[in-house]
Image: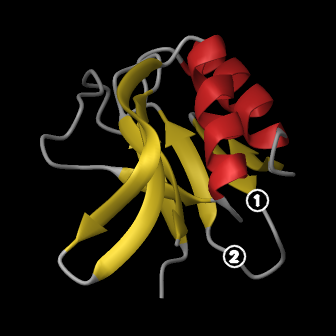
Amino acid sequence: MIAYTLIGTNNLDKLTAFYDALLAEVGGKRAVEVDRVILYAGAEGTPFFGIAQPANGEPATVGNGSMVSLGASDPDTVNRLHAKALELGATDEGAPGPRTNQTLKFYAGYFRDPDGNKLNFFCLS
């Protein structure tokens, strides 16, 4: 259903370096680079993840209530990727661990990238 997810940045070079290193940990790589947009690809047939400077030329802002969840294969991978994000300059928004949301049981670690976008690494448990 989802073709790609895009988050905004005010410093494309800085955020590109962050996601180049972070997504390489799970086999992600740059797939499309057009002007102000970079899309990363993972496994064949999975949605793209992208970063972009806003098309309207206004500063990128962080959405209140917005979050992108990046899939991980297991809790150990969530732990490793969350630690890598922090090592690369992200801030912690919730240490990796098990969570239960009514009937959904999952394992996730939350962080904000260097531009303040909220993301997590997630797997079902």
Q: Which mark is residue 99?
A: none
Q: Residues within 10 Å of mark 1 (few under 14, many from 20)?
A: some
Q: Quadrant of residue 38?
A: top right
Which residue bears the numbered disc 2? 46
**Residue 51, position in %: x, y?**
53, 39
**Residue 88, position in %: x, y?**
65, 14
**Residue 1, position in %: x, y?**
48, 88
Q: Which mark is residue 41?
A: 1
Amino acid at circle 2: Thr
Q: Dot 2 lies on which element?
A: loop
CB atoms of marks 1 and 2 within 8 Å: yes
Picture residue at 19% right of the left edge, 40% below the top: 63
* Residue 35 appears in the figure: no
Q: Is 28 situated above or below 82? A: below
**Residue 16, position in %: x, y?**
67, 25
Q: Quadrant of residue 12?
A: top right
Picture residue at 75% right of the left edge, 82% below the top: 45
Amino acid at circle 1: Ala
Viewer-closest of 95 and 29: 95
Q: Residues within 10 Å of mark 2 (few under 14, many from 20)?
A: few
- Is 99 on the left-hand or right-hand side of 82? left
- Is 32 on the left-hand or right-hand side of 24? left
Q: CA distance from mark 1 to mark 2?
A: 8 Å
Viewer-closest of 55 and 119: 119
Picture residue at 69% right of the left edge, 76% below the top: 46
Q: Is 70 situated above or below 124? A: above
Picture residue at 72% right of the left edge, 49% below the top: 77
